[in-house]
Image: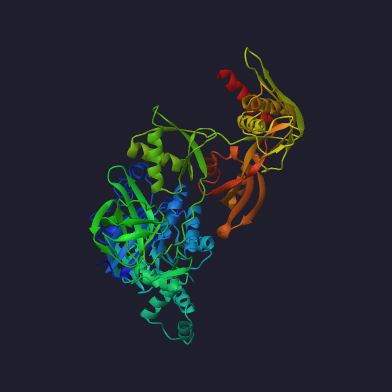
Amino acid sequence: MGFDVEKIRNVAVIAGGGAGKTSLVEAVLFDAKATGRLGTIEEGNTVTDFEPEEMHRKNSLSSSLACSDWKGHRLNLVDTPGFINFLEDTKCCLSAVDGAVVVVGARVGVKAETVKVWQYADDYEIPRVIFLNKMDRENANFQNALEGIEQSFGMTAVPLNIPMGAESSFEGIIDLLKMKAVTFKSGSPVEGEIPESLKEEAEDYHRQLIEKVAESDDTLLEKYLEGSDLTEEEIHEGIMQGTLSRAFVPLVCGSATENIGVQQLLDTILFCLPSPAAKAAKTPVKGTNPKNGDEVVRNPEPGAPVSLRVFKTLADPFAGKLTIFRVFSGTVKSDSALFNATRDSKERMGNMFYLLGNKQTPVKEVGPGEIVAVAKLKDAQTGDTMCDAAHPVLFPPVQFIDPMISYALDPKSRGDEEKVSSGLQRLLEEDPSLKFHRDMESKEMILGGMGQMHLEVTLEKLKRKFGVEVIMKTPKIAYRETIRASSSAQGKYKKQSGGRGQFGDCWIKIEPLTRGGGFEFVNQIVGGAIPRQYIPAVEKGIVEKMKEGLIAGYPVVDMKATLYDGSYHNVDSSEMAFKIAGSMGLQKAVQTAKAVILEPIVNVEVNTPEEFLGNVIGDLNAKRGKVQGVDSMAGGAQKVNAQVPMAEMLTYANQLNSLTSGQGMYTMESSHYEEVPSHIAQKLIDEKEEAKKEG
């Protein structure tokens, strides 16, 4: 049987890139004796950054699970990516945990990505503690960092310890609950008396801590105001309740790489962050019955009907698929028959494992609150709900945002298209924030993701795991053509070459429709000027010509075509002749219909620190963008809303990084089409003519 639900802590370690999440997880695993050595990013031997792409870049690019035990509790730590390209993975992981450790660097402070993942944690109502890391680094400043945290997150941070010294003189912490100094020898904490020089500061922080705790509970507040001391148990209870209700966020400090303050963080996790039972009591786990739509609550009890959520998938060409899931209720055995409520299919559970990075420990049976992996499920994918078939439940899906950037892919070796396609389909199982399709218009394979780095890492995995290489090219923009004026013309096709000839004659009128109006065909033939059986052929000729384009080779949209007259020949007329006549009529009519090229416009939302606002707006204007408005965000960030031509946004991820020193973020979605400026239209027309000559 698995672990007692009260003794489980499911914790995501979240932050922007470079804050020290992986180093912190490494120190936790070492202190909890889950590992025998302290790995480092530089040496590429950490437990949770085990993919070759992560070792090469020295950054977490994918979430990773590490189980360990601390003081009789099971800790399921999820080391999450912090770079903007990979935050969708982090968001998905937050759907499976009950608490989070937010890592903030004492020198750099809160990054834009950290604010983003903080918002994700808000969405899931997840209690948090903050680990103020890198107190040993140059320019580390506890007070400045504390103020920055409160400003960025809009929430009171309550220190449970303060540093003794900073930068190279950082030697330990002062525990504000025990009012003891703690120094560290080879990572082991040694308690002692608080130095005289720090006593006044420590007492001041201790008083603030007690006040915050008292404010979280009316009974404690009354006792405090009456002048009575709170007991250690009351203080712990007050901190836990304040954390759970998110009245404040506890903060501890230290250095992950020096293993200072990490054991205090572990103790803080145990009494501040909730067990699955405590989290469910505060925020019940709810879903819907897929059969009737009724709301269903799932309690974290071993005897309850099974329910679980898949939050991570690992694709391996040799070992097969590994599915990582969180059990919300019931008991799962390695031979359980479950129902996939998301896909309406049956699954038979196979071998299950606890994970420590890429190390697997087999387990036969797990209970509520546990996080484990299972091998070779048939249909299950990231985000799926699986449950007891007799008591079905479907949890709300994780919503992934649309790709920020897309590239066309060309296999390096001819004939590898199928290998590219099948390999990418497997990688899409690992990463649902990727999108892959074949563009029917351009015939290109298109891969979309959250940024250039995201796509590059995906293609590195494609090469490593599936042995196929591709070249990334800027994809073709989906330009369109339309008309701005009405026009009429005759399309007459007559061919005589011995034997039966070809004859088709039609008069058509074309008119512009409103943007988004599509295509409309109207038949106004009366008196049999054109026999009924040939009229669909005229429409077909017009439609095929519209697909080919009229001035630059792009499909024609928002046009009405009316067939109002024509003639035919009893012997020589045919469907083919009228199809050609329809095409000719459209080509002639367009010459006086003021044909123009349209380009796709996207809605763009850019989040940037205020200091870069001018740069961002200036750049959007230079991209022919129209800024719709600027809104102030928490922590002094600014949100810019704009509409920009898609053609100008293809490499925006890299440009925004340069403009904002890596602190800006953006999202975009399709909006509408607008007419292309004449100089760009001419360039596109010239390109088509050039291609014709070369073809």
Residue occupying the point 47% across, 63% down: 124
Q: How many marks?
A: 0
Question: Where is the N terminus found, in terms of image quarters?
Answer: bottom left
Rendering coords of residue 23 (x, y %):
34, 54
| Left or right relative to 584: residue 298 | left
Which residue is more in the foreground, 186 or 374? Answer: 374
| Left or right relative to 155: residue 165 | left
Residue 160, compared with residue 442, is above or below; it is: below
Which residue is more in the foreground, 448 or 491? Answer: 491
Q: Residue furthest bottom?
A: 226
Whether residue 175 is visible to the viewer of this picture, yes or no, is no
| Left or right relative to 23: residue 205 | right
Rendering coords of residue 553 (x, y %):
61, 29
Question: Where is the C terminus found, in terms of image quarters?
Answer: top right
Which residue is more in the foreground, 204 or 59? Answer: 59
Q: Residue furthest top?
A: 498
Which residue is more in the foreground, 586 or 326? Answer: 586
Residue 19, compared with residue 522, is above or below; it is: below
Whether residue 694 is visible to the viewer of this picture, yes or no, is yes
Residue 106, compared with residue 518, is above or below; it is: below
Rendering coords of residue 118 (x, y %):
48, 60
Residue 354, compared with residue 645, is above or below; it is: below
Residue occupying the point 38% across, 49% down: 62
Which quadrant of the figure has residue 541?
top right
| Left or right relative to 657: residue 197 | left
